[in-house]
Image (spheres, helix red, strand yellow):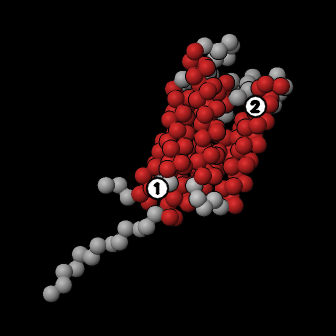
Amino acid sequence: MIDRRVLAGAGLAGSALTALLAAVGQVDPDPQLSHVSLTVSDFAVHDRGGATDTAMVVFGLSAWCLLPALRQTAPRVLLALFGAAMTVAALAPTDLGPLSTTGYVHRYASMLAFVALPLAAVTLRPVSRAVRWTAATAAGFAGLMLASATLADRFLIGAAERYLLLAEVVLLALLAARVRRDCPARPVRSTVSHA
């Protein structure tokens, strides 16, 4: 059986790898793309199966690494939902033009993931100040992204989403560090025989 601390450590490492892959995915799939006005998913369309898609899968798997160590039902369910939604969003690409069925699946899976992770964080008791503020930051940028998409003709939607994703990666890292800290270390077995 895998040690829960090891799994939580894998979740923490996965958060760092997600950030690295996401950054790589933003470097020049097409020089004409705007980081401010286009979403991360728009960038991923130009690099299908590349760093951004991989980052999304790693992000989802990193959340799942924390599940065996969680005892509270609400955060466990929400974190499992986040991991599933993030994986589905990676496998179902968006469209650059009018949305196909796959594009709608991507959109709603992404929205579900953006909501599920902050909710998982604030339902894991006790909630630290860092987690509370990071979750609030993520919620704020999610609100800005929604406002941009519905009221402002996608003005600055790319910037809002990138800050949202940064907050969510930090949030998962904070959760992984908390879960790892809270897992009891396995005692070291002595190999010395006693007479």
Indicate the amino acid at tag 2: Leu
**Quadrant housing residue 191:** bottom left
Q: Quadrant of the N terminus?
A: bottom left
Q: Residue at x 61, y 34 (%)?
A: 112
Q: Identify the residue position indicated by label 1 in the image.
A: 71
Q: Find residue 54 and report its horizontal and vertical position in percent.
A: 53, 34
Residue tagged 2: 146
Q: Which quadrant is the C terminus positioned in?
A: bottom left
Can see residue 91? yes
Q: Which residue is nearer to you in this view: 53 or 117?
A: 117
Percent from the top left, x then y, of residue 7? Answer: 43, 53
Look at label 1 and name its amino acid: Arg
**Does the rendering let one see residue 24?**
no
* 168, 109: nearer the viewer: 109
Q: Position of residue 103 (x, y in %)?
A: 60, 19
Residue appearing at x 22%, y 80% in the figure: 192
